[in-house]
Amino acid sequence: MHRIVGLDVAANELRMVALQSGFRGFAVADVRRVPLPEAPSLAERLSAAVSQLPPMGDDAIAVALPAAQVASFVFTLPFVDSRRVEQVLPAEVEGAIPFDLEDVVWDHAVLSQGDGKTEVLVAVVKKTALQGILGSLAEAGIDPRMVTFAPLALGALAERKLLADGGEGTTALIEAGPDRAALCLLYGDKLLLARALATSGPILWQAAQRDAKAREKILGPLLRDIKISLRARASGELQRVILAGDLAAFPEIGHRFEMELNAPAGPLSLAPPHDGANGAEAPEMSLALALALRAQQPRGRLDFRKGEFAFTRNLSQVRGTLLQLATAALLLLLLAIGLGTARVASLSRQASDYDEALCAATKKTLGTCMTDYRQAVGALSGGRSRAAGIPRVSAADILAQVVARLPDTSMPVIEDIDLNTSTVRMRGTVESFGKVDDIVSALRKDRCFGDVKQPSSQKARDGSNKVSFSLEFSYTCSGELPGGA
């Protein structure tokens, strides 16, 4: 099944954290650490390390560029409209770098918006550097879906509420190793600053595990840069310091940072339920885990895979997807054919049963088997059988039709009515001569009442002001001629 993989290419090893996404979040599917052997090129080192990992063909992979290849800037723009931000940023970036915009790839992430201002983090890499790194990864069989900025990716640990030491107030998350150092400044789960820092080389880091002087050569410049960043960006007192990467393995490192930064300090730990012993909770795996988290929700965050470097699936993946779609379409077609065949068979059986029933009825009535409905109706109506005299409508049907046509405002008192399937005779009284005309007009609107002539009407003989009337008209919807039974 499709996984999301964060790959951290460290100085001497390749670190991998694979996540399995679900409706309720994610689960850590795999954690690996394999050494990067010595080799003439990065591609050869990566190939040797990747050969020790499980296949990652369909996985969504996220990596971070080496800190030395990326320049980052924070711009404060005097508006919050996202469209204006997009319009203004190119000029701001071009003024901050010593290259033409055509020679670089850059992207941005909004850090904060408020009081009519927008703070934007911009990261820039030269196209030649990005092309070389993607080429080395491709030679090792890695086609990352996302290439981002390591300090910014670390912020995903707080945004997804994975830090056990997270909480209100300002937090400094520091990840450092022989090849990189990053400061991620947070307020709660919101990112305030993501910055790459200077670091020492692998030789000094190896000696620092047992040599206090070597350790001091690493920590002195690192702490100085951190203090400068805190003075520039931290709002209020620092509440906690979280240490990650190889830095967290230094002896008494927490005490040293507490003394220097006046805040509780300790190695990174994950909040439940992600604090289990699966390997992802190790401080050294923090960047790999953060990269996987960032790839899981990349929208609105910095990604260098854009433009000519945009991620595209390779041809084999496209063919595999097309094959799956074709197989699914074929199955649907077969199901549709099967369903259509079943329906046709069912309709054929129903038609056969209907023909048998019609044949039995006509044979009993006419003495001849007929399976054509129209022929049967014609024969039954032709006077050759006992059924020919059966009227199509009853007297009750005709009476209901007459009453339905009488106007509510001129409803008569019907004294006598004589009707059959071809003629209606009616006698009654109404309030005035005008209401007699209303009754005649209403009956003439029904197509079944033919030749409704003006009735004979006169004043009632009982001395009242009522009008007596009598009328006669034919009924034409029974299919019989006037004078029929």
Image (cartoon, rainbow, N blue to C red):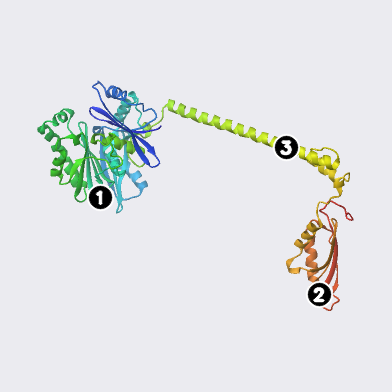
* Image quarter of the C terminus: bottom right
Above or below, 184 relative to 427:
above
Residue 168 is marked as 1
Residue at image position (43%, 27%) is 317
- Which of 461/98 is in front? 461
How far apart are the two marked residues, 2 and 3, measured between alpha carbons? Answer: 61 Å
Spatial CA span between label 1 and label 2: 95 Å
Note whether 222 is above or below 485 in the view shown: above
In the rendered image, the residue lying farthest to the top is 40
Picture quarter with the N terminus: top left
* Other residues around mark 2 within 10 Å, as few (<14) / some (14–19) / many (≥20): some
- Reading the image, the residue beneath label 3 is 351
Dot 1 amino acid type: Glu
Instruction: Name the amino acid, label 2.
Output: Lys
Q: Considering only order in the chain, which callout, 2 or 1, is on the residue closer to the N terminus?
A: 1
* Outermost residue toward the left in this view: 213
Residue under numbered circle 2: 466
Mark 3 surroundings: few (<14), some (14-19) or many (≥20) residues within 10 A: few
Please tell me whether mark 1 sits on a helix, a strand or a loop. Answer: loop
